[in-house]
Image (cartoon, helix red, strand yellow):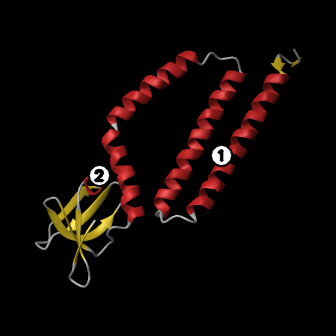
Amino acid sequence: MMEIAGINIIQVAEVIIALAATYIIAKTIARTLEKIFEKTPFPEQIERGIVKISKYVVYIIGFFVIISFLGFDLSSVIVGLGAFSIAISFATSTIIQNLVSGILVQADKAFQIGDEIKVLNFEGKVVKISIRTTVLETSEGHTIFIPNSIFINNAVIRKNRQNQNATK
């Protein structure tokens, strides 16, 4: 082994290469996603979130590659992360369902801010569409926060501007 002052030069080189590769891969994926999103109707907030998550995933993988280059045994860490991931997915399944539904609602454009809609027993004017919920204001002035998954799983009646009803 090539060592200088007790430092393994090969390991240092592997770590530097892994760091550089991780950075380049993360940047490349981010740029590619940004180019793809230029051609899609997704809101900028969603696009930025997807790009950030993708970069974090690459950085985490790069971190584990670097740790393995340094000689650490990752098998117990991977098992622990697997169990943790399963627990997190169960705990956040409703939130994730609403987030995915939010992306679909915004991409589908079945209704927009200002439209009068009815879904299930909820009826009102759309005042906000976010990634997790859609906000309606009723004719009585009440505010209703509806999880976006409701719009994916149920018929939505939209009152058109010409006072005609359209059903999604």
* In front of the other: 38 or 156: 156
Specify the quadrant that holds the N terminus.
top right
**What's the residue at 46%, 64% (across, down)?**
43
* In front of the other: 149 or 166: 166
Residue under numbered circle 1: 26
Judge from the rendering whether residue 5 lies leftward or rightward of residue 69; answer left or right. Answer: right
Tell me how many marks there are. 2
**Cβ–Cβ below 8 Å for labels 2 and 1?**
no
* In front of the other: 156 or 127: 156
**What's the residue at 56%, 65% (across, down)?**
39
Q: Which mark is residue 88?
A: none
Query: Badge 2, how many Cα within 10 Å: few under 14, some, many 20+?
Result: many
Residue 131 visible in rendering: no
Q: CA gap, disc 2 to disc 1?
A: 31 Å
Task: State the image quarter where residue 160 is shown.
Answer: bottom left
Q: Position of residue 113 (x, y in %)?
A: 32, 72
Specify the quadrant that holds the C terminus.
bottom left
Query: Badge 1, how many Cα within 10 Å: few under 14, some, many 20+?
Result: many
Task: State the image quarter where residue 120 is shown.
Answer: bottom left
Amino acid residing under circle 1: Ala
Q: Position of residue 129 (x, y in %)?
A: 33, 64
Task: State the image quarter where residue 86 is shown.
Answer: top left
Amino acid residing under circle 2: Ser
Q: Position of residue 83 (x, y in %)?
A: 43, 23
Judge from the rendering whether residue 163 lies leftward or rightward of residue 2; answer left or right. Answer: left
Above or below residue 61? Residue 71 is above
Above or below residue 50? Residue 74 is above
**What's the residue at 48%, 21% (across, down)?**
80
Mark 2 element type:
helix
Residue under numbered circle 2: 149
Residue 1 visible in rendering: yes
